[in-house]
Image (cartoon, grey):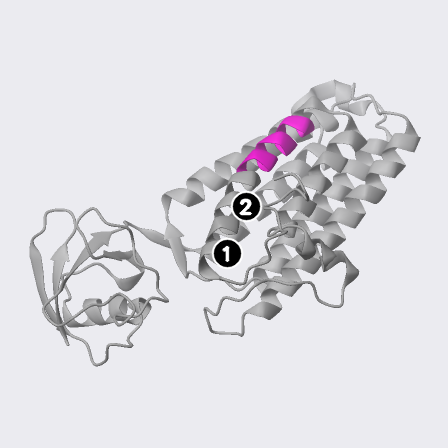
Amino acid sequence: MELEILNAKNSKPYGKVKVPSSTTPIGDLRALIHKSLKQTPHANRQSLRLELKGKSLKDTDTLESLSLRSGDKVYVKDLGPQIGWKTVFLAEYAGPLIVYLIFYFRPELVYGKAASLPISLTTHIAAGCYTVHYVKRLLETIFVHRFSHATMPLRNLFKNCTYYWGFTAYVSYHVNHPQFTSPCMCTVWAALAAFALCELGNFSVHIALRNLRPPGTKVRKIPVADGNPLTKLFDFVSCPNYTYEIGAWVSFSVLTSCLAAYLFAFAGAFQMTIWALAKHRNYRKEFKDYPRQRRSIFPFVL
């Protein structure tokens, strides 16, 4: 089979590529295009489509499933500079850990002489929670997560780091402030227990999702609960990792009674809800037998 490859920006032809089989997946086609036509963008920068303004094709699609025939046209869009998902995750999670602990361990750099005032037990607990969360995130990025895509646009590095690092500075400034006022300790201990439960739940779901995808593959399956009771949330929502994540940050906000923390929790919940709705739609579209009783992120509600 021979396909004509064109530039999606100006419709100018790059040339033609011979494809060995109609069962070739789009992911392999991208690599073949760059290998055969050196003037095309690197495979990681390519977005392939069948029409000039059409939708990007999935890596798992095959030429046969797309009804492509010899002589058909495939458009290549250059996605621009790319960076590895793992690199972005490590940067966006290491930053908050460093920023928060600067406020916690070296308050005199921020608050001056006022930093000599004694700080509350709640401030110490909050620092522990923040540290545990981002250390967990870093370890998951290195040892747990299996990414379906190798890269993302380089601009995402700056966008993501600005969000995480900036919000951390905002939250940390107030929670570590010498004039920070703690809520009652009953509230603190209850919120700490909820935070710990949500962190464990989030980790459990990440392990369950990892086990769905064999190493080195892009296999997609319907996520289901495993033997861990904390994964039972899969029976109710498509993205329980987001549910637990929101629960953890709401718990942290209650623990500190800090407006900045509530704003961070709300912003995160808003973004994760958007992601969950999109993933839920994709699951239902991809799997005909997908459980109908599931919601996206909040059980019985949304």
Residue occupying image coordinates x 60% and y 51%:
239
Q: Secondary structure at mark 2?
A: helix
Q: Is residue 205 visible?
A: yes
- Residue at numbered disc 2: 276
Residue occupying image coordinates x 66% and y 29%:
171
Q: Secondary structure at mark 1?
A: helix
Quadrant hosting residue 230: bottom right
The image position of residue 261, as x and y in percent, is 68, 29
142 is higher (above) or lower (below) than 156? below
- Residue at numbered disc 1: 283
Q: Is residue 55 left or right of residue 270?
A: left
Q: Nearer the viewer, mark 2 or mark 1?
A: 1
Q: Is residue 31 left or right of residue 302?
A: left
Quadrant hosting residue 182: top right
Q: Name which residue type carries label 1.
A: Tyr
In reply to whether residue 62 is colored magenta, the answer given is no
The image position of residue 284, as x and y in percent, is 50, 55
Report the front residue among 66 and 270: 66
Q: Which residues are magenta?
A: 261-271
Mark 1 burial class by Cα count in 10 Å: few <14, some 14-19, many 20+: some
